[in-house]
Image (cartoon, grey):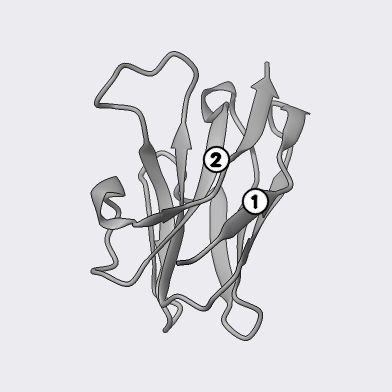
Amino acid sequence: QVQLVESGGGAVQAGGSLRLSCAASRYTDCMGWFRQAPGKAPGKEHEGVAIINSRGISIYADSVKGRFTISKDNAKSSLYLQMNNLKPEDTATYYCVATRRICALASGLFDYWGQGTQVAVSS
C-alpha cells in the first residue's frame, strides 16, 4: 500500500500561481496529478493533469502545457505541481496518484490516490 497526502491548494485569482505537494509513504516509479472539476458528469470525473516517471520523463494534458510543471524528488518520495497562469477552468480538486503499472495519463492505471486538495481560481 502507498499512502499519499496532498497539500498546497487554495484560492487564487486568474493569472496567479500555486504549488501543490504530495508526500508518499513509499517510493513509486510513476506518480502524477489528476483533477476533478465541480459538477463533472459521471464517467468523466477525473482528468489527467500530468505524470512523471522515475527517469523524470513527464507527460502533460494539452490544457496545462506551458503553465504547469510536474517534478519529483525520488529520495523524499515527494511529488510537486507548480501551477502558473491559473485560469478559472483549472478550478478542481487535485489528486496525487501513484502506480506500479504502466506510466500513462489514464486514471484506470493508478492504484493509489490521495484525498485531494482543492484549487479555486476566480476571474
Rendering coords of residue 98 (x, y %): 43, 62
Q: CA distance from mark 2 to mark 1?
A: 8 Å
> In the image, residue 19 lies at what x, y percent?
70, 51
Q: Which mark is residue 82?
A: none
**Residue 35 drawn above or below residue 91:** below
Residue tagged 1: 6
**Residue that carries the numbered disc 2 in the rendered image:** 94
Residue at horizontal 71 percent and vertical 40 percent from the top = 9
- Secondary structure state at the residue bearing disc 2: strand
Q: Is residue 55 above or below residue 24?
A: below
Q: Horizontally, is 119 left or right of 51 in the view? A: right
Comparing 54 with 62, the one in front is 54
Mark 2 residue type: Tyr
Residue visible at 75% across and 28% down in the picture: 11
Where does residue 122 sit, x and y in percent of width and height? 69, 18
Q: Which amino acid does the dot numbered 1 rest on?
A: Glu
Q: Position of residue 103 (x, y in %)?
A: 29, 67
Q: Quadrant of residue 46?
A: top left
108 horizontally vs 21: left or right:
left
Density class for disc 2 (Cα within 10 Å; few <14, some 14-19, many ≥20) is many
- Mark 2 and 1 residues: CB-CB less than 8 Å, in contact? yes
- Which of the two residues, 61 or 37, is positioned nearer the viewer here? 37
Q: Residue at x 55, y 40 (%)?
A: 94
Q: Earlier in the sequence, mark 2 or mark 1?
A: 1
Quarter of the image with the C terminus is top right
Instruction: Write down the quadrant of residue 99 in the picture.
Output: bottom left
Closer to the observer: label 2 or label 1? 1
Q: Quadrant of the N terminus?
A: bottom left
Q: Quadrant of residue 90?
A: top right
Q: Which residue lies most toward the front here?
A: 1
Label 1: how many Cα within 10 Å (few below 14, some 14–19, many 20+): many
